[in-house]
Image (spheres, coloured by chain):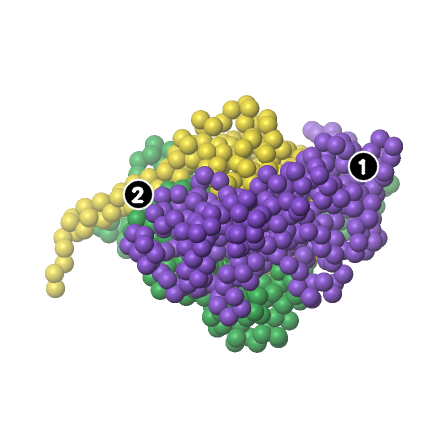
């Protein structure tokens, strides 16, 4: 086998492998759309998206309550996580002494890697009974939001911190030299300069929140109702798929794939926003 | 630098896996429609090329694999019977999985398992798929509450009103002034289907505010952890962590279900695609025979 | 208009920053701390070496669960690593700046953000149902490969790109073919980086639940072949917490998971710092 032959062979193998990821993406899209589109056709797009009743036994498939559920827990978790996460990122990037950072940074990184079921377990054991004391039965949007917050925080902290840290030192020195206080420097100089990175971290966190499944099943109660207060139970799009896919058949299965389509589109939009934000961020930094 | 030979190992291993995959795929495709006892057809292709996957009744006993999936109500008793069956025939491997009655029906219809399990009657549509049911036991459905619950018994119509959302407070039932937390099973659950059929009737549906759990175990865990909860549970899952409420004055016990006084009882089914053959037939006969029924009688209602 | 003094704002802001930081750290410590405190007492050699009694009684240990997890991760890695490595070699060394390359990159990026359950749905439709692999280690592993490919490609590509350009010039100047450059030079030099990528993927495979919940079957029995079902540590935590009252066992399994993740994090950090030192040292 001549080395030139190997070289040519390798070129092809390497190329094929590279296309695999794109092929997988295509395959996922094709499979999910192929299985899901009949549901849209049969049920009707509007009925499916805005239908309030999900009762597979009676052939009623409306996912509006779950769309609301997904949006509610995502919003809830972000409202909690964004201020805390950015405060923590500022602390780590610019305020805390080096020793504290050396201790905290690996901890945050570790938390990104903790399995979601562990968060769910802690939520189930500690949080559900605690929330039950306030009202409702404990399985609620509030509980789910807090659990999700804990899962989203590490993502927001680590990416925000990186982007704040990436702001050139000269910016900060300039502001401080002009007599700005530390906080003015952070608020007027560092945060605006790191804006796109922080934005990306939030969008990624949002993606994680929307996509989370198992921890949600464990603490949200999976009830198919339009939640009125944070103490009401709900069901997320992801939870709907995971809980029912194993026994669904026929139109029910199609409807679950259609749920997947809605989720998929949601995520692709979020990701595109993240990509745009990220590109703009790097662009700005190379220009200045 | 790293030796070349070592680095050939990875792609080579990947190749091997692919070969196995392909082999497994073809074996599977040919064997599933016939529904012999080939539970894991690719075992020929993967680890043990000498062992054939089809059942063989040899002089020493039976050998082969059986997979069962479906109803989580049937799961505990199926696991126990499987253990006894494997103890008797060491060459046999029986794998029991959960999923729910819907899974049991679906998987057996598609041929992905040898035996499906369901805890409700088959619908006519399902029978039309060529699925044959075998009643292996009967089971009561208990109405359960937290162990600290003051209310001890309910009438069947009260149960119906609670689950439909007409009664929402324990004080309406002689308990504390607390909102009732209804916990139910997912659609697709045989226990839910049986409960709806026997308690709710055709026109009343379970309230949408009910917390939904995807298995008997998850339902029990939820009720056991919530002082104001109520739920319905297979007899086979009852233990001291929850309290079974009397229905129409009759305690939810196996004895009462057996003598016909307890009102909520349904059959537990094993399902096969077509009449069972070979190893699967042996296993089902074992369930129906004295050894199997003795295990059934521990937590469920045996057939005789 | 009232404007607070800069000094007051400064104090207030610092108070909130420290407050926010402390709350965050507390929350995060509670998660890890609680699981470790509750789980470690239940952790013993006995727990690690006895099989669980089945999905419905919480009794027993996690021996078969550990075997299933290792089996699944091994199969995943064996399929994932060659594809991921070659793909990243293509993107780092071969790819021209054309539309196809952009398409591939876009694919990788989008794939990275797709939620696990969508991969699960895909795996369920393709591997479990269409290809008749049923609920099995194989279905789970193939689904995981799809899920992890973006991570593998990205991190490996970074490792390959980190190799200084002068190295390549030197090798090519000696008349080596491109493949010889890749196989004999880039691979060995970037090896620690690639190993880091692999360990990272192993970590994510261990964390994963949603896509396995719908493809792996969840059987707690000892897996005997690629086509037998299985249950990973993460799934076991889920089943224990949901199906049984055995929270102590769930916590103990959770503790095992957290310790594994700590070890994996430590390994990746150590390896990547070594990798950087190695490249830096030779410059």
The colour of chain C is yellow
Assign a secondary structure to mark 2.
helix
Q: Locate residue B220, reporting x and y percent.
A: 48, 46
The residue at the point 41 percent across, 66 percent down is A226
Left/right of residue B81 with respect to residue A47 in the rendered view: right
Question: In screen coordinates, is C201 left or right of B111?
Answer: left
In screen coordinates, is A97 left or right of C147?
left
Q: Nearer the viewer, residue C243 or A236?
A: C243
The subunit letter for the residue under badge 2 reads C
**Chain letter behind tag 1:** B
Res C95 quadrant in image: bottom right
Residue bearing the label numbered 2:
C23
Q: Can residue B20 be seen in this view?
A: no
Q: Along the line of sight, which residue is nearer the eye, C158 or B219? A: B219
Q: Colour of chain A?
A: green
B24 over A230 or under it: above or below:
above
Residue for badge 1: B63
Q: Which quadrant of the figure contains the N terminus of chain C?
A: bottom left
Image position, residue C29 (x, y; %): 37, 37
Give how far across and how far down residue B304 sits, in percent. Answer: 67, 46
Tell me the tag on residue B283.
Answer: none
Q: In which quarter of the image is residue C185?
A: top right
Q: Nearer the viewer, residue B150 or B258?
A: B258
Say which chain is purple. Answer: B
Count residues near mark 2 (Cα–Cα under 10 Å), then give few for <14, some for 14-19, many for 20+: some
Answer above or below: position of A286 versus B2: below
The x, y position of residue A266, in whole percent, is: 51, 64
Residue depicted at x 72% and y 44%: B288
Toward the left, the furthest residue is C2
Looking at the image, which residue is at 62% across and 75% down?
A41
């Amino acid at each position: 086998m001549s080395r030139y032959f190997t070289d040519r062979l390798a070129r092809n193998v390497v190329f094929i492998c590279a296309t695999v990821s794109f092929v997988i993406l295509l395959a996922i899209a094709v499979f999910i759309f192929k299985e899901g589109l009949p549901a849209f056709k049969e049920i009707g797009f509007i009925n499916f998206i805005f239908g309030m009743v999900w009762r597979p036994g009676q052939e009623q498939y409306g996912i509006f309550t779950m769309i609301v559920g997904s949006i509610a827990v995502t919003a809830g978790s972000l409202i909690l996580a964004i201020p805390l996460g950015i405060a923590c990122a500022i602390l780590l990037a610019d305020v805390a002494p080096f020793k504290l950072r050396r201790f905290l940074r690996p901890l945050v990184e570790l938390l990104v890697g903790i399995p979601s079921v562990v968060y769910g377990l802690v939520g189930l054991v500690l949080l559900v009974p605690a929330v039950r004391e306030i009202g409702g039965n404990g399985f609620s949007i509030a509980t789910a939001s807090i659990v999700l917050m804990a899962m989203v925080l590490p993502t927001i902290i680590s990416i925000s911190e990186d982007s704040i840290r990436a702001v050139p030192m000269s910016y900060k020195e300039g502001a401080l030299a002009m007599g700005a206080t530390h906080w003015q420097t952070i608020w007027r100089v560092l945060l605006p300069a790191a804006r796109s990175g922080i934005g990306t971290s939030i969008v990624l966190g949002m993606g994680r929140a929307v996509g989370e499944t198992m921890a949600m099943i464990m603490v949200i109660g999976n009830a198919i109702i339009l939640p009125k207060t944070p103490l009401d139970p709900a069901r997320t799009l992801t939870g709907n798929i995971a809980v029912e896919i194993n026994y669904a058949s026929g139109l029910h299965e199609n409807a679950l794939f259609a749920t997947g389509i809605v989720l998929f589109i949601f995520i692709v939009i979020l990701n595109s926003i993240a990509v745009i934000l990220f590109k703009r961020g790097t662009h700005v930094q190379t220009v200045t | 630098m790293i030796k070349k030979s070592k680095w050939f190992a990875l792609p080579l291993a990947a190749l091997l896996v692919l070969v196995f995959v392909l082999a497994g795929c073809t074996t599977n495709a040919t064997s599933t429609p016939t529904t012999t006892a080939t539970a894991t057809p690719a075992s020929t292709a993967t680890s043990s090329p000498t062992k054939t996957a089809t059942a063989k009744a040899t002089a020493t006993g039976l050998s082969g694999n059986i997979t069962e999936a479906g109803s989580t109500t049937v799961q505990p008793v199926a696991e126990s019977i499987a253990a006894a069956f494997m103890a008797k025939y060491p060459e046999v491997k029986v794998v029991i999985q959960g999923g729910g009655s819907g899974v049991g029906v679906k998987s057996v219809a598609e041929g992905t398992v040898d035996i499906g399990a369901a805890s409700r009657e088959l619908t006519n549509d399902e029978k039309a798929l060529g699925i044959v049911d075998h009643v292996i036991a009967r089971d009561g459905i208990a109405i359960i509450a937290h162990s600290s619950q003051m209310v001890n018994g309910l009438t069947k119509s009260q149960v119906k009103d609670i689950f439909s959302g007409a009664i929402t407070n324990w004080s309406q039932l002689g308990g504390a002034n607390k909102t009732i937390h209804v916990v139910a099973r997912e659609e697709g659950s045989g226990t839910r289907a049986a409960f709806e059929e026997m308690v709710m009737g055709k026109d009343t549906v379970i309230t949408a505010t009910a917390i939904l759990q995807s298995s008997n175990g998850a339902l029990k865990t939820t009720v056991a952890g919530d002082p104001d909860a109520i739920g319905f549970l297979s007899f086979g899952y009852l233990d001291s962590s929850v309290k079974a409420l009397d229905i129409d004055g009759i305690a939810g016990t196996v004895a009462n279900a057996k003598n016909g006084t307890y009102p909520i009882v349904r059959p537990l089914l094993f399902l096969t695609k077509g009449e069972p053959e070979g190893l699967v037939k042996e296993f089902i006969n074992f369930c129906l025979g004295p050894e199997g029924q003795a295990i059934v009688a521990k937590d469920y209602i045996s057939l005789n | 208009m009232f404007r607070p003094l800069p000094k007051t704002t400064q104090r207030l802001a610092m108070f909130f920053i420290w407050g926010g930081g402390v709350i965050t750290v507390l929350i995060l410590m509670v998660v890890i701390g609680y699981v470790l405190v509750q789980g470690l007492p239940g952790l013993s050699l006995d727990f690690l070496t006895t099989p669980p009694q089945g999905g419905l009684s919480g009794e027993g240990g996690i021996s078969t669960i550990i075997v299933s997890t290792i089996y699944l991760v091994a199969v995943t890695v064996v399929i994932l690593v060659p594809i991921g490595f070659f793909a990243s070699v293509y993107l780092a060394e071969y790819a021209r700046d054309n539309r196809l390359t952009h398409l591939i990159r876009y694919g990788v990026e989008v794939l990275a953000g797709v939620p696990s359950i969508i991969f699960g749905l895909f795996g369920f439709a393709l591997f479990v149902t269409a290809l008749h692999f049923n609920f099995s280690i194989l279905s789970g592993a193939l689904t995981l490969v799809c899920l992890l490919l973006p991570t593998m490609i990205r991190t490996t590509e970074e490792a390959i790109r980190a190799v200084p350009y002068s190295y390549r010039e030197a090798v090519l100047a000696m008349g080596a073919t491109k493949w010889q450059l890749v196989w004999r030079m880039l691979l060995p030099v970037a090896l620690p980086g690639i190993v880091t990528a692999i360990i990272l993927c192993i970590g994510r495979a261990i964390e994963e639940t949603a896509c396995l919940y719908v493809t792996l079957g969840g059987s707690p029995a000892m897996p005997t072949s690629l086509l037998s079902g299985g249950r990973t540590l993460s799934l076991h935590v889920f089943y224990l917490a949901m199906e049984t009252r055995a929270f102590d066992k769930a916590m103990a399994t959770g503790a095992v998971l957290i310790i594994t993740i700590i070890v994996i994090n430590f390994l990746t950090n150590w390896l990547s710092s070594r990798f950087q030192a190695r490249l830096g040292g030779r410059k």
